[in-house]
């Protein structure tokens, strides 16, 4: 256990403390960091308001979009798919999540860019439609990137569901929609809660999708951070933005977990796969 | 229902398929298919920048995943006997390592290491006789491996621990009752049972490191990993060569993932 502990302390705990300390410092004359103690960086956070606003608007919308697309698929996999194909189909959903998000976003640059779908639309006589570098493109990228992460926890909770309950409901004469609304949906809520939390957390720190598909017009806090550390080399202010991001995440996730605890029945595991 | 599932699978796989298809483009135009050829693969593989970036990615992914697997497995095994505050603290660190965005981990590692090197490098100059020959610390393989290993190790701990939880304990007791040494029991009973978890964890760790862009972007120093190379090329425009590189990257991770997934599922089905 010692090597693992040392690794965690050196590469996680200490660096995070450094960020916290730096967030109270000042920018050096040539960039970097000069020790100081002031709240100036935090008071100046309004300068990056647009990035926080975009993140706080598009991350929840993206999460909900993932949920609505993922739920029927998870339901199909857990309840309807034949046992023979189930594992194979499930693997096919999960595998894209672990392949390069960079290459997968790039595929959408290719599809949504001027020579891709807009070209097809123009040929169909629909006129010029701008797709790339819009919030829509970023949302497509988000759903494409994080759909698998939403499907899996919902699948797990639907799969654990006692199928006899469904039979009982239909035997007792409940219409399929009622069975779904009063039996299936409530019992799958833990999976929904886990999936939403995982996707939302990852979206809050997203950089690549807005960078590739938002073209500088739709930017997240992650993009502001790269800008601050790479272009303007303002480490102190950048650290304050990073601390603010983690705080916003902590507050939202804690509030969310409080809110969903009654569905999950106290179960709050992180299922990664 | 079936149609809906088919539509989602098409949504997941058609964009990837199009990239692969266009990587075989015989023409020069990025988005007009003019016959099939493998010329772009040849171009990519004879581009020294691509080959060097690939080597860097491979070295970092191999080293970080091996270290993460060894230390992660050791930690997962040791954690069995740990309860109370120590356990809670360790769990919190795993949780933080997985949940804090990669971009924040990247930034934190960058500024912590640069600050540390700014202190250490003048000291090294003092220790060594001549200032020119004194070794200087900088960002590079070390920082890449350490930063990737952090996430990978958390991943391995989570997966191996799940395997240990599903393990048949009575076998360990039986082995001890029959007079096996603790090491013998570990090698012949525990290890074979948790091995699928270890292997799947290692494969996922490798894939994570091989595909990671954002952490590497901050801590790579003057090194270039394959994702960093691809990202900067995309900024210059879409070319068939990127399609070819992308297809190869996808192929590598697809192979590893399908292996990892089938090992995990087979293991899960058995227990």
Image (cartoon, coloured by chain):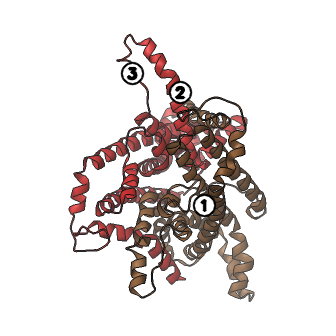
Instruction: Identify the chain drawn in red.
Output: B
Q: Position of residue A179 (x, y in %)?
A: 71, 82
Q: Is residue B111 left or right of residue B212?
A: right
Between disc 1 and disc 3, the foreground one is 3
From the viewer's perspective, is residue B216 above or below residue B17? above
Q: Which residue is mark 2?
A: B116
Please say if A251 is above or below B32: above
Q: Which picture quadrant has residue B137?
A: top left
Q: Secondary structure at mark 1?
A: helix
Query: Chain drawn brown, letter?
Result: A
Label 1: how many Cα within 10 Å (few below 14, some 14–19, many 20+)? many
Q: Chain of mark 2?
A: B
Q: Which mark is residue A199?
A: 1
Badge 3 is on which residue?
B135
Tell me the element at label 3: loop
Q: Do callouts 1 and 3 mark residues in contact (Cβ within 8 Å)?
A: no
Could you tell me which chain the residue with mark 1 belongs to?
A: A
């Amino acid at each position: 256990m010692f090597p693992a502990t040392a690794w965690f302390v050196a590469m996680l705990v200490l660096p995070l403390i450094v960020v916290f300390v730096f967030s109270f410092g000042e920018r050096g004359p040539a960039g970097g960091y000069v020790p100081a103690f002031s709240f100036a960086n935090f008071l100046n956070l309004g300068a990056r308001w647009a990035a926080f606003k975009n993140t706080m608007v598009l991350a929840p919308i993206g999460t909900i979009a993932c949920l609505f697309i993922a739920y029927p698929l998870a339901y199909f996999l857990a309840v309807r798919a034949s046992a023979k194909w189930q594992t194979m189909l499930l693997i096919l959903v999960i595998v894209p999540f672990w392949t390069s998000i960079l290459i997968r976003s790039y595929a959408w640059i290719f599809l949504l860019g001027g020579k891709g779908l807009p070209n097809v639309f123009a040929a169909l006589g629909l006129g010029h439609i701008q797709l790339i570098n819009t919030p829509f493109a970023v949302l497509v990228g988000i759903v494409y990137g994080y759909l698998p992460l939403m499907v899996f926890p919902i699948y797990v909770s639907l799969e654990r569901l006692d199928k006899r309950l469904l039979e009982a409901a239909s035997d007792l004469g409940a219409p399929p929609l009622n069975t779904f609304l009063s039996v299936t949906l409530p019992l799958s809520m833990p999976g929904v809660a886990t999936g939403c939390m995982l996707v939302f957390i990852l979206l809050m720190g997203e950089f690549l999708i807005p960078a590739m598909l938002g073209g500088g017009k739709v930017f997240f806090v992650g993009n502001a951070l790269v800008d601050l550390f790479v272009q303007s080399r303002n480490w102190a202010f950048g650290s304050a933005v990073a601390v603010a991001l983690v705080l916003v995440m902590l507050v939202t996730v804690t509030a969310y977990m409080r809110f969903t605890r009654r569905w999950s029945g106290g179960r709050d595991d992180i299922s990664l796969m | 229902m079936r149609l809906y599932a088919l539509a989602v699978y098409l949504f997941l796989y058609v964009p990837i398929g199009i990239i692969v298809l266009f990587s075989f483009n015989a023409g020069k135009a990025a988005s007009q298919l003019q016959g099939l050829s493998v010329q772009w693969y040849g171009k990519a593989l004879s581009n020294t920048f691509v080959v060097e970036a690939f080597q860097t990615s491979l070295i970092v992914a191999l080293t970080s995943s091996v270290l993460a697997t060894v230390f992660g497995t050791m930690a997962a095994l040791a954690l069995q006997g740990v309860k109370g505050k120590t356990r809670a603290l360790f769990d919190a660190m795993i949780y933080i390592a997985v949940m804090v965005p990669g971009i924040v981990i990247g930034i934190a590692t960058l500024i912590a290491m640069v600050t540390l090197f700014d202190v250490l490098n003048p000291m090294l100059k003092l220790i060594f006789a001549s200032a020119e020959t004194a070794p200087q610390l900088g960002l590079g393989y070390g920082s890449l491996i350490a930063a990737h290993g952090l996430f990978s190790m958390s991943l391995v701990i989570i997966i191996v621990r799940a395997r240990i939880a599903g393990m048949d304990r009575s076998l360990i007791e039986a082995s001890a009752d029959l007079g096996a040494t603790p090491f013998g029991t570990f090698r012949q009973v525990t290890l074979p049972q948790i091995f699928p978890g270890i292997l799947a964890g290692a494969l996922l760790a490798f894939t994570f490191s091989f595909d990671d862009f954002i952490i590497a972007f901050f801590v790579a120093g003057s090194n270039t990993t394959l994702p960093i190379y691809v990202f900067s090329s995309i900024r210059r425009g879409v070319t068939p060569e990127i399609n070819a590189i992308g297809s190869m990257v996808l192929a590598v991770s697809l192979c590893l993932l399908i292996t990892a997934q089938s090992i995990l599922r087979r293991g899960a089905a058995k227990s």
